[in-house]
Image (cartoon, grey):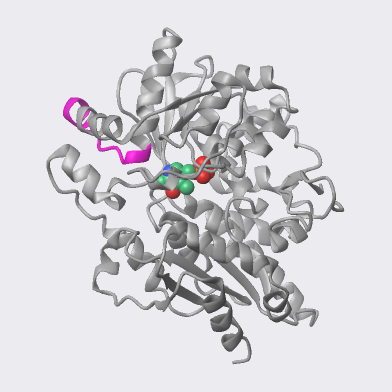
Amino acid sequence: MHYYSLGKQSPNVDFKTAAITGQAPDKGLYFPTTIPQFTPEQIERFKTLDKATLAFEVMKPYVGGTIDDTSLQQICAETINFEFPLVPITENIATLELFHGPTLAFKDVGARFMSRCLGYFAKQESAAILQSKPNTVLVATSGDTGGAVANGFLGVEGVNVIILYPKGKVSPIQELQLTTCGQNITALEVDGTFDDCQAIVKDAFMDAELNAAYKLTSANSINVARWLPQQLYYFFAWQQWVAKYGDQTPMHIVVPSGNFGNICAGMMAKASGLPLGHFVAACNVNNVVTRYLQTGNYEIHKAVATVSNAMDVGNPSNFIRIMEIIQNNFESLQKGLSSYSYDDAATASAIHRVYKTTHYILDPHGAIAFLAAEQFIKEQEGARSLILETAHPVKFPEVVEEAIGQTIEIPDSVKYLLGKEKVAIPIGASFAGFKDWMLSKAGS
Ligand SMILES: *Cc1c(COP(=O)(O)O)cnc(C)c1O
């Protein structure tokens, strides 16, 4: 298994190179040269496999021999070492809770898998004395990504992580998740917006001096090592779905979508033979894809801030991978994917209504998925659907507590953060200041 660049101007590479470099030299996203095909017999067996074994069997073809089986088994077991329970909310809508990982958001799985792969490759290189510069992961975050990456990479030898986050624009728990790790994790508090953070990271990858001093890589979902393991949710969901509703009930899936990495991973799982139903992308008012499906015009725009801020994306980077899966055919796209979009008022009122009628507490991203599921079911009479709940509601206390009229209990798994001290280095919003700081660190 190799990976080609969707920019079509770079040579094919193996999984290791794709994971270490993130993006192809032509700035294209990497995509597997073949999508593995699971046989009906394998799929049947998947129904009852334990999560770690299933994860290993799904990921093995994608890793293509660059990680030995024993190590990959261990990486997979560590990656999925928490629960992904399927919980019915109403008669026809169930949720798969993806927020039981250490940072309470679904990005934990991708971050954990990627960090362990990079750690494995770093060890290999230091054994062969190939390692001349430290591997440095640069991430810009609006909240969730940074926490998951910090937690996933903490203590991984041979890899340093630098996280840029916008000052005052992440929630208190998110900030503690970013700034209290220490060790190989450094948090930079940028006096600017998320877009400024992202612009600094982009400039860094293009900067000759920084690339001479560091081996830089990104940890967002363009990296195949973070994107591909997200397929596992759909396998775990399907196992529980079949056990609960039988394998004759189609599992239609609604995914809260921003950069479209998660939903695209689900579509890969389906393309590799997992019998999934229709996909629905649930979006906030950043709805490029919703409008594209309606009009056929793909018009990117500047991101608009909403209460479901992990989906505030004006130009979803993984959509091009979805187009590759369906071979750039607009009719196939419409056949397999729908999309609905909702604003903040609808989001808050859905959180309120679902809590009042079912006692289930949705987070703002899950609330948008719930609305999309209701809409989809209305159009497809008798259908059942599954929503992915991508974050724990406690990560968005202002919106959720206001909507349900009470406070949310902080789960034990994050209570330990509350007594910790924030450590962050303040920097300005310009690339020049960031670069000076990086170069001053490089020698030390
Ligand atoms: C990142 C994130 C999303 C969006 O996922 P994409 O893969 O970028 O589409 C949705 N919800 C939450 C809580 C997130 O953190």
One can see residue 58 in this view:
yes
Q: Residue furthest top?
A: 381
Residue 47: quadrant of the picture: top right
Segment tinted magenta in the rendering: 355-365
Q: Is residue 15 magenta?
A: no
Quarter of the rendering occupied by the C terminus: bottom right
Q: Residue furthest left?
A: 405
Q: Is residue 353 left or right of residue 297?
A: left
One can see residue 277 in this view:
no
Name the residue rendered at 27%, 50% in the picture.
394
Q: Residue furthest bottom?
A: 444
Q: Position of residue 311 (x, y in %)?
A: 44, 43
Q: Is residue 264 left or right of residue 125?
A: left
Q: Nearer the viewer, residue 153 or 376?
A: 376
Name the residue rendered at 44%, 20% in the picture.
245
- Whether 259 is drawn above or below 71: the answer is above
Q: Is residue 401 left or right of residue 122?
A: left
Residue 284: quadrant of the picture: top left
